[in-house]
Amino acid sequence: MKTILITGATGFIGNYVVEELLRQGYHVIATSAHEKNAIDKAWFDKVIYKPFDLSSFDNTVNYFEYFLRPDLMIHLAWSGLPNYKNEFHVTKNLPAQIRFLKNILDNGLRDLAVTGTCLEYGMKEGCLSEEMECEPTNAYAIAKNELRKYLVHYALENKISLKWIRLFYLFGKGQNSNSLFSQLENAILKGEQVFNMSSGEQVRDYLPIELAAKYICTIALQDKVSGIINCCSGEPVKIIDLVEKFIKESGAEIKLNKGFYPYPDYEPMAFWGDNSKLKKVIHNE
């Protein structure tokens, strides 16, 4: 059975990915910057936990050995979200990520899966496929895209299996408190009468986190399809429709103050993912 290293294990996505891998019977090595956040996780006693903070990277350390020579690494760690526009993604996060990944690859890792972002596509609208050129416009997306390009070049030169898992929108328990659905759930729990939001006419592509975690694991564990793989539903849906559905399923009565917030300027109005490549992975075609 493979031993799998998960970075960012205590994050929203990482927590579910660890649980999914354990459910499938894999040996898991989990890492994050703060051990105190890991101790409270239900999976803590079922994994090997190795604390690591990218900001304290030491190139004299062999991180492949430090993380016990994993067969596969699923790299989820990235700091500073959801602040997409801050330049530290390019000036600090990107070089730190490259240093760390180069170290662990140079020292022996041969199978790597990394999560990217649909924001790499830039301001394109409609159905977005992996073959489209990336034109990122915010610092976070630019940094992710540059990391991808670096890893693609490295993988080709060194015969590394690289899967770039391009995430679209996710929702579920444990999501960042600033996310739309976390704010809505909190407002409902507090018994608030009004919820402020945008007009909600944006069209997006959403996956529940449990399903996204399964897709991430499936993509990472297989070896037939490499490169960029959209992790998405392939189904366009309006934000307002999702919000109203969430309220109905919660049995809540809360008025929506639509148009209170302007639409974000870092993403297009209507876009969703082409999941054709993902389907090939899921169905092992």
Image: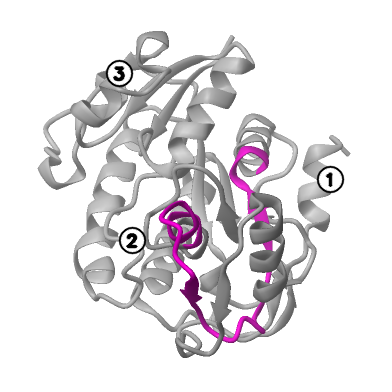
User: How many other residues sit within 10 Å of disc 3, few (<14), some (14-19) or many (≥20)?
Assistant: many
Residue 157: percent from the left, percent from the top? 48, 48
Q: Which residues are magenta?
A: 184-211
The residue located at (24%, 48%) in the rendering is: 99
Which circle, 2 or 1, is nearer the viewer? 2
Q: Which residue is mark 3?
A: 49
The amino acid pointed to by label 1 is Lys
Q: Establish if 46 lies above or below 152.
A: above
Which is nearer the N-term, disc 3 or disc 1? 3
Real-space Cα distance between discs 2 and 1?
Answer: 31 Å
Residue 94: percent from the left, percent from the top? 29, 61
Mark yes or no: residue 68 visible.
no
Q: Is 224 in front, or is 156?
A: 224
Which is nearer the N-term, disc 2 or disc 1? 2
Q: Which residue is mark 2?
A: 81
User: How many other residues sit within 10 Å of disc 1, few (<14), some (14-19) or many (≥20)?
Assistant: few
Which circle, 3 or 1, is nearer the viewer? 3
Pointer 3 with pointer 1, Cβ within 8 A? no
Q: Which residue is mark 1?
A: 280
Q: Is residue 116 left or right of residue 236?
A: left
